[in-house]
Amino acid sequence: MSSAAAAVPTTDFASLPFEEKLDRFAKVAVHVGLNLQPGQELLISATLEMVPLVRRITEHAYKAGALLVSTVYSDDETVLARYQYAQDASFDHAAQWMADGTAAAFKSGAARLALAGANPALLAGQDPAKVSRSNIAASKANKPAMELITRHAINWSILANATPAWAKLVFPGLPEDQAMTKLWDAIFTASRATSNDPVATWKAHSQHLHERVAYLNEKRFHSLRFHSADGQTDLTVGLADDHLWAGGGGTGGNGIFCNANIPTEECFTTPHKDRVDGVVQASKPLSHQGTLIENIRCRFEAGRIVEATASAGEDVLNRLISTDDGARRLGEVALVPHSSPIAQSGILFWNTLFDENAASHIALGQAYATCLRGGEHMDETTLAGKGANSSLIHVDWMIGSGQMNVDGLASDGSSQPLMRAGEWA
């Protein structure tokens, strides 16, 4: 949506002590992201550097009536220790007991909150084969839990926490303390935490996105054509049968409205796994599991990637799309205007949570069942029959820019401009 949908900052937010800013952000997590309900359990995932925010979120969760808040922490140094010292068999193994516990928590009604912000380049120097094997093992173990997420069976949300390694990558020319300050300010602004009433601000923003979603659902396009002015992208993305557009938050299978991504600027839906053709060039780098993949370029035929290159991280990219057959196919397509506040900030976040909301994007892998009519009640075979992709992965990467044009194509081949030079037409 246009920047007009962004929150108007309060005149005093910038002068607030950092602890008060963090407290307001924690309220956004609990009341906007999760909309946590009295009596719910909450499961949080974070790194050790995120303890201050976790503590404030936990406080507000209990004030909101949470039954129990549990946090699972990870640590960059112990992650690296595995790659340096673990036996080879370790990389084909995942803690199934923990994954089973997570799925059990979701099935029992727990909400899920993930804090993003780990070092985007943590595993850049590690063996790509080991990274790939580890990711596959983790994806297999966590599939039951992730299916509940992709079906939106529960209320869940992801938001960010600035960390020194991430801040250094985003603002490489600044001392650590200044880089951290600038990154936190960017997070607060993009997440609409700077207004007097963030809950009301988010309701207004969701309404703008819902209006755009309603328009797209009314049009019922058969496919979308992305074509950039520089000629680097000419991609036709067929849309799944009975697809539904979504955006601006939604109601989970448990009846609770939540905003899954903080921030969010996208309208998204499910592509048809067999109807994607053409070439596409990434407009921003992709940070994936500790590796930076730059200048991705892919060619699709009949829905499947048949050629993939990158100027950096190409080996990781090719291992990623070899995870399973669905990893070479699309599970999501999203439209984001170039006037998005995140795009206009001029910041490359090196973090998909933010960068995907600065540009139209596509995602390799698993489709969201809720982006099909009645999809949350369908089994995998029925979903596949509608064109929904199935995979162990779901990885977004950005293709939109100020040069991107998008047309909506009807089943009879007629077209209608949707975006010109990155903006809604």
Image: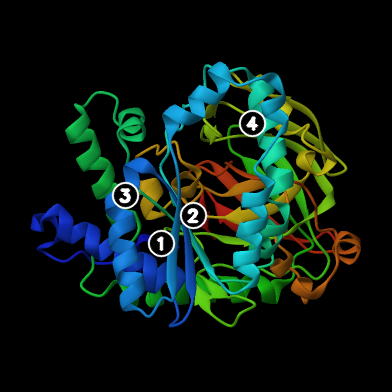
Mark 1 → mark 3, Cα distance in angstroms: 34 Å
Q: Position of residue 109 (x, y in %)?
A: 58, 74
Is label 3 in contact with label 4 (beta carbons under 8 Å)? no
Is label 1 in contact with label 2 (beta carbons under 8 Å)? yes
Residue 174 to residue 103: above or below = above
Q: Looking at numbered disc 2 in the image, what kind of residue is underneath it?
A: Pro
- Between disc 4 and disc 1, whose residue precedes? 1
Q: Which mark is residue 2?
A: 1
- Evaluate whether residue 201 shows in this view: no
Identified at 24% across, 23% down, the residue is 173
> Considering the image in quadrants, where does the C terminus appear?
bottom right
How packed is label 2: few (under 14 Cα within 10 Å), some, or many (20 or more)? Answer: many
Mark 4 → mark 1, Cα distance in angstroms: 26 Å
User: For mark 4, what is the residue?
Assistant: 232
User: For mark 2, what is the residue?
Assistant: 337
Mark 2 → mark 4, Cα distance in angstroms: 19 Å
Q: Position of residue 21 (x, y in %)?
A: 20, 59
For this rendering, which residue is in front, 228 or 63? Answer: 63
Q: Looking at numbered disc 1 in the image, what kind of residue is underneath it?
A: Ser
> Considering the image in quadrants, where does the N terminus appear?
bottom left
Please give left or right for residue 167 compared with residue 418 in the image: left
How packed is label 4: few (under 14 Cα within 10 Å), some, or many (20 or more)? Answer: some
Q: Position of residue 353 (x, y in %)?
A: 48, 49
Which mark is nearer the camera, 1 or 3?
Answer: 3
Q: Which mark is residue 51?
A: 3
- Between disc 2 and disc 4, whose residue precedes? 4
Is label 1 in contact with label 3 (beta carbons under 8 Å)? no
Mark 3 → mark 2, Cα distance in angstroms: 34 Å
Which mark is nearer the camera, 3 or 4?
Answer: 3
Q: Secondary structure at mark 4?
A: loop
